């Protein structure tokens, strides 16, 4: 009888320990989800035309999580690196309608009107990936506004960076697009925003 009680006690202790470990793990996960991403400032307002000639404005992105980057047509090599990573993000976004990609194209002199469509087709962009542009002066002003939104977070050359913007229009992440870990970091932070917004 004593042996049976000892076995029962041991089993009960093991079950209780497993439940406690499970609770601690769950609680730690909740705390990680609640961990605030940095808040860098409000993303600048814009209203630009995309590859389909449709107007894309910041206000139309309210309620969505989006990634912004700049594409400099005068520097195709550097732009191709970030655009390839955008394509990787686009593939990962396909299952979620809350996510959008905005690639702001800095026009080159005598740029062909079809360049946005060409970029979209080259990178097999889904309907959630918008290549947008405007006049060179307008894009330069927008670049200056982005620098003000994320002071000290870039080396002033915004062409190398991705910006994560939450559903309220706040910049929540700044990533060096040249880093091999950039895509995974962005996806991880998007996951955090999605989980916290659903609570």
Image (spheres, rainbow, N blue to C red):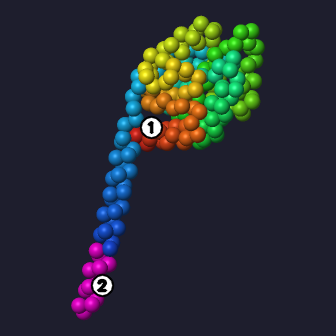
Q: Give the percent coordinates (x, y) of residue 48.
A: 60, 15
- The crowding category of the residue bearing disc 2, from other C-alpha atoms within 10 Å (few below 14, some 14 to 19, many at least 20), is few
- In the rendered image, the quadrant that contains the N terminus is bottom left
Question: Would you say the residues marked 2 and 1 are in contact, meaning their CB atoms lie under 8 Å apart?
Answer: no
Q: Is residue 105 left or right of residue 141?
A: right
The percent coordinates of residue 195 (x first, y second) are: 43, 42
Q: Which residue is mark 2?
A: 7
Residue 193 tag number: 1
Q: Residue at x 50, y 22 (%)?
A: 155
Q: Identify the residue shown where x is 49% and y is 42%.
A: 188
Quarter where residue 160 is shown: top right
Which of the two residues, 23 or 162, is positioned nearer the viewer here?
162
Residue 193 within the segment the image draws in magenta: no
Q: Earlier in the sequence, mark 2 or mark 1?
A: 2
Q: Residue at x 23, y 90 (%)?
A: 2
Give the image location of residue 74, x and y in percent.
69, 17
Q: Is residue 11 above or below residue 27?
A: below
Q: Quadrant of residue 84?
A: top right
Q: Which residues are magenta?
A: 1-13
Measure the alpha-carbon separation of dots 2 and 1. Answer: 46 Å
Residue 189 in the figure: left or right of residue 47: left
Quadrant (top left/top right/bottom left/bottom right) for the C terminus: top left
Please determine whether, in this image, residue 116 is positioned above or below residue 86. above
Name the one closer to the observer, 121 or 105: 105
Q: Quadrant of residue 21?
A: bottom left
């Amino acid at each position: 009888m004593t042996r049976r009680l000892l076995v029962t006690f041991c089993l009960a202790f093991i079950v209780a320990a497993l439940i406690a470990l499970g609770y601690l793990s769950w609680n730690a996960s909740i705390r990680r989800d609640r961990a605030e991403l940095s808040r860098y400032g409000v993303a600048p307002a814009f209203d630009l035309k995309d590859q389909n000639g449709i107007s894309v404005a910041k206000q139309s992105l309210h309620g969505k999580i989006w990634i912004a980057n700049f594409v400099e047509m005068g520097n195709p090599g550097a732009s191709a690196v970030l655009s390839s990573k955008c394509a990787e993000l686009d593939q990962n976004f396909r299952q979620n309608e809350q996510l959008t990609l905005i690639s702001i194209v800095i026009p080159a002199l005598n740029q062909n009107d079809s360049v946005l469509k060409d970029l979209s087709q080259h990178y097999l962009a889904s309907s959630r990936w918008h290549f947008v542009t405007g006049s060179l002066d307008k894009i330069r002003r927008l670049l200056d506004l982005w620098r003000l939104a994320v002071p000290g977070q870039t080396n002033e050359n915004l062409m190398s960076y991705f910006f994560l913007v939450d559903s309220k229009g706040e910049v929540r992440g700044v990533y060096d697009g040249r880093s091999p870990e950039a895509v995974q970091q962005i996806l991880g932070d998007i996951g955090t925003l999605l989980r916290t917004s659903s609570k």
